[in-house]
Amino acid sequence: MMDVVLRELTVRDLLPAQALLTAALPYDRSDVVTAEKLLASNFRRDRFSVGAFSSDGELLGVMAQAGRWIKLIAVKPAVQRRGIGSALLRAAKEHVVQSTGTATGASTKLRMGDHPGNYLSPGLDERYLAGQAFFRARGFGEAARLLNLRAPVRDNPLITEERLATLHTAATEAGYTLRRATAGDVEPLLQTVSGSFAPVWSFEVARALGPSLVKGEATEWAEELPEGPAVHVALDGDGAVVAFAAHDGNNRGLGWFGPMGTLDHHRGHGLGEALLLGCLLDVRDRPEGGVIAWVGPVGFYSRACGAVPDRRFVVFEEL
Ligand SMILES: CC(C)(COP(=O)(O)OP(=O)(O)OC[C@H]1O[C@@H](n2cnc3c(N)ncnc32)[C@H](O)[C@@H]1OP(=O)(O)O)[C@@H](O)C(=O)NCCC(=O)NCCS
């Protein structure tokens, strides 16, 4: 077991943390989202981001936690298999036990990956075999398998300005207005998302709207994007928001799509498809533009934009 000193990470640790994550996690673009994963808000869950340092101050391991979720854990490749990952995991367990307390009855079982609202990926990429062996050896079992899709955003006849124009015309004829969200939409949009879908989605949508429209926790470490607010909305004849689609609300800068939703009564008019397309056209130049993370309705995305299975993940939980 190698001797390490554990302490919470600060902004001064971002550069070495970025280098470490890039080396240890070759299938993730953590280089783009290091600050968001380590230092930005986890919506309602407690943030705890810890580094393991050598006696001369070199960063050797990183763990980021949100409540009982581990968002990422990584050890510098040259010093793996010397107990550093285990030390970080023990710190995670101590923290969750301490911060949850005994009175609440809430679970303190650690879980890896699928932390709603702020996650690097929705589980452990199936190709990270050392990671899988590590979690199994430390008393975790498989809790779920999840899938990311990816829509090819270039040379795809389903993702073109022309098709977007056709879908917009159909929506206009049906009495709707489709456009990029503006400052006036922020409040009604976030209320609709929170009330009719999920509060944590409103956090992602707030981050997607960006720091010029939303001040506060959701846009900590969020930079402005060239296209402006990364949310497209559909309004009915009375001007009420009835559908939305967002991108860059989690892992901002990568071009990941989601979340999206259409209110029940307004489904079946092609609104979702049109808003999805608006988003995908925005992200054509992003490092991972077109990734649709942690999907539910695979059939919808396959038909609407030719999305195909991309990465597969295992979610681990303490047994
Ligand atoms: C997962 C990871 C953080 C483990 O860190 P580590 O410091 O190497 O882990 P430890 O030394 O504490 O290993 C503890 C136990 O896990 C198991 N284990 C760890 N790495 C393993 C490997 N490559 N093969 C098989 N078992 C392994 C072993 O049982 C090990 O105990 P042992 O060495 O006494 O046999 C490290 O492998 C890593 O950074 N991987 C890349 C990043 C990653 O996949 N992170 C998870 C998703 S974010």
Image (cartoon, helix red, strand yellow):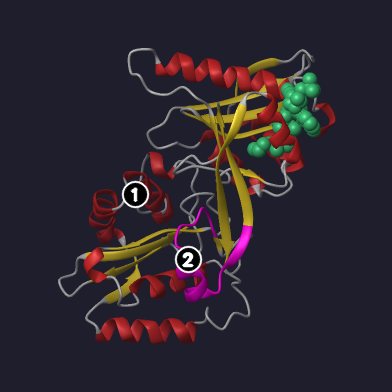
Pick out the residue farthest to the left: 238
Count numbered badges in the picture.
Answer: 2
Mark 1 vs mark 2, CA separation in Å = 20 Å
Per the rendered image, the range of residues in magenta is 292-310
- Say if residue 75 shows up in the picture: no
The yes-or-no answer for disc 2 within 8 Å of ligand 1 is no
* Mark 1 residue element: helix
Q: Position of residue 1 (x, y in %)?
A: 79, 14
The local secondary structure at tag 2 comes to: loop
Residue on which the image places disc 2 = 227
Residue 173 located within the stretch drawn in magenta:
no
- Where is 102 relative to 118, above or below? above
Could you tell me which residue is drawn at 30 percent across and 75 percent down?
268
In this figure, which residue is indicated by the disc labeled 1? 202
Please state the horizontal and vertical placement of residue 96, each as a whole percent of the image. Answer: 48, 20
* Residue located 39% across and 75% down the image: 274
Image location of residue 84, percent across then percent down? 73, 21
* Residue 275 can be seen, yes or no: yes
Name the residue: 67% across, 30% down: 136
Name the amino acid type tagged 2: Glu
Compared to residue 221, the image places residue 244 above or below, namely: below
Q: Is residue 142 left or right of residue 181?
A: right
